[in-house]
Image: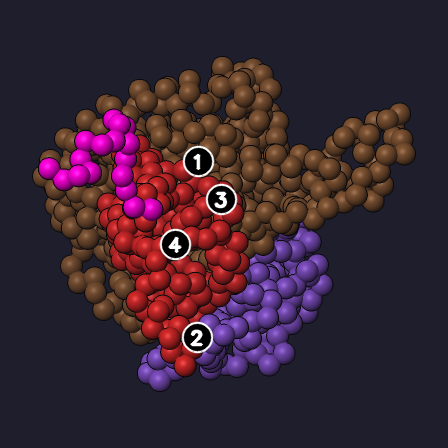
Chain colours: A red, B brown, C purple
Amino acid sequence: MSWIENRFEEGLIVTSLDWAINWGRQNSIWPMTFGLACCAIEMMAVGASRFDIDRFGAGAFRASPRQSDLMIVAGTVTYKMASRVKRLYNQMPDPKYVIAMGACTIGGGPYFKHGYHVVKGVDLVVPVDVYVPGCPPRPEALIEGLMRLQDKIRHQTRAIDPMTRVRREVLAR
Amino acid sequence: MAETVIETQPDLHFDVDPSQQGDLRTEEMLVNMGPQHPATHGVLRVVLRTDGELVLESVPHVGYLHRCAEKIGENLQPYQYIPYTDRMDYLAGMNNNQAFAIAIEELAGIEVPERAKYIRVIFAELNRIASHLVAFGTYGLDMGAFTPFLYSFREREMILDLFESACGARLTYSYITVGGVHEEMPDSFLDVLHEFLDYFEPKIDEYNQLLSYNHIFVKRTANVGVISAADAIAWGLTGPCIRGSGVRWDLRKSTPYEIYDRFDFGVPIGHPGGTEGIPNAVVVGDCWSRYFVRVCEMQESCRIIRQAMAQIPEGEFTAAKVKNIKLPDDEVYVEIENPRGQLGFYVRGDGSAIPARVKARGPSFCNISILNHIGRGCLLADIPAIIGSVDIVMGEVDR
Amino acid sequence: MVSEEICDILKSEFGDAVVGSVMDARRPYVVIAADRWAEVAAFLRDDSRMQMNMLQCLTALDLLEDNKLAAVYDLFSFPVTSAEEVPLLRHHFAVRVEVNRDDPHIPTVSHVWPTADWHEREAYDMMGIVFDGHPELTRILCPDDWIGFPLRKDYEYPVDYHGIPGTTEHQLTNPRH
């Protein structure tokens, strides 16, 4: 028997700060209602009766970027829309995440060759965390993408990560 | 608000009581609504000039989803272009496939087998129901009612399951192609469809109880955004928008394409309030009429599907040799009845396999152009009601 | 009424404004001189024999080999009635207005058919046809600072737009244009 066992009252939870914060964040990702095109209909289907994204804590679709954590870019981004996408991303509070949903947002999709007005991937405009392929992706695929995003959040740490430390050391030299 | 003095806009639709005109002046304000707004059904942007709650001007700005569909049409063979028609009106992919397929068939002189025509009608009408279900559900969302959305998507998923069993896709089908349909229906498809229709038809009454006659809903939509029949025609409105204005016009009935002349179905139109159980506040051509036309059309589509299922013959599901068609040096303009109105395809061939020009006349493009005309003088909260009742799909407005 | 009869009426009313007509095609049309088009349009709408109260579609064409641009107007006489039996006036008619590719000017018909407003803006945006007298002839689909008219056959795809790269690969392979 170790010295620490049986020393605390019932109901006390011992955890790390990282785990607690990540646990909270990953289960309350509030997406922004940001439907651009066809994929938006599948995004609506994810929020509706059969697929019910609320099971993952991501069902509170916010109309304003200032209240949301996740931007699901669902549909083709055009040049006319690109500046708006960027502005909406900038309006979101940190920490913020982006899911690129569908072939168009990944790399132009079917509009790559002749789409003179289509941005060839939303990662040219805003940084993307998770790519969900498909044209449009099935709702299951979007849920899978959301779960991968939760994995990503789960492994975040408040400590300086090794890459940042290296970068700082290089800069300090 | 009744005290508002509007001297610069003498031709507005609302009445300003002269006795109420005092010194109170409010400042005009420009409100930018969209392109990211939950009630604009996509990426429509409306610039509103408001005086308090009153909308003086509402100018729609489109093009945020311009995906160069017409340029792509000039670079691909018709067979390859079918998937792009799906993505124009992505709520009614089947109907768009059908319109383009009919245009190419007419241009190249391809005869479609009888069975394929019936399959096309069944799928087009199913897609009409699915599209109207989305319109119904999201219109409830626009008006602040969340539950109808869940109900309508429950039934819509069943239709999508049927589509999926036939062609493997949930939203962008490319099932109806030039010369017929892409593949034969699965074995038990018609049985499942029978079951679905038996299940679905009573649900329409449920929708009516849930939303159509809801007191708050009627208050929000009746006598709002009224479009007269003459205006509707002049602005090129089609589909439920013009039928809501009391004009009995449906291409399936008036100039039947494919085999629609073999079916018995009605064309619902907007009726004045107080008649046929319609709420008293309703006037012909308002948001409620347009909405209700869609609900009634779901019933009629069910009737068409039932008749088509009873009549469907055995045979081929596609004409032979549909790839690499040479398009003659000629042009066609074909219109069919989409869930949103008349979808037209202008195709011009030049002797090669690739069209020289493809032009799509999107019904939503014409339907939304009237927004500034009818939105003038209404309240700010009525603008989402009007946009929702017109039921636009931006993929088709911008193409 | 069939297109031949409409064409004959137009010829007797306007004479040389009818530049040409193609009546044996799958979709017959008449070619109207650009400078007379506005008055012909008003006649088509208002005359009791025509009553073309609906502009269904406006298609802009690029006829590169003839060095011309064309606007094709699909007209329809819409029966203004709510009865099941619609009256006889229910005819389609197509009008084509051809202009020089270097200086394309067509008078607007947005005062005749309000729906032409947006259609003409689209034709201007995509093909560069200038509609004289249009209340607000600006780009509708592309951004205001867009360069070039995309649906012209000799259009060059943008290499980038405001720092966002375009399809450079397309420039290299360049299949048709």
Of A75 and A66, the residue lying toward us: A66
Report if residue A6 lies within the magenta region.
yes
In this figure, which residue is indicated by the disc labeled 1?
A: B138
Q: Secondary structure at mark 1?
A: helix
Q: Residues within 10 Å of mark 2 (few under 14, many from 20)?
A: some
Q: Quadrant of the C terminus of chain B?
A: bottom left
Q: As drawn, is B125 to the left or to the right of B187?
A: right
| Magenta residues, start to end | A1-17
Q: Residue at x 22, y 42 (%)?
A: B163
In this figure, which residue is indicated by the disc labeled 4?
A: A97
Q: Amino acid at mark 1?
A: Thr
Q: Amino acid at mark 2?
A: Pro
Q: Does the residue at mark 3 contact the one at mark 1 (Cβ under 8 Å)?
A: no
Image position, residue B273 (x, y; %): 57, 19
Q: CA distance from mark 3 to mark 4?
A: 13 Å
In this figure, which residue is indicated by the disc labeled 3?
A: A67
Q: CA distance from mark 3 to mark 1?
A: 22 Å
Image height check: is C157 above or below A18? below
Of A51 and B285, the residue lying toward us: A51
* Discs 1/2, front: 2
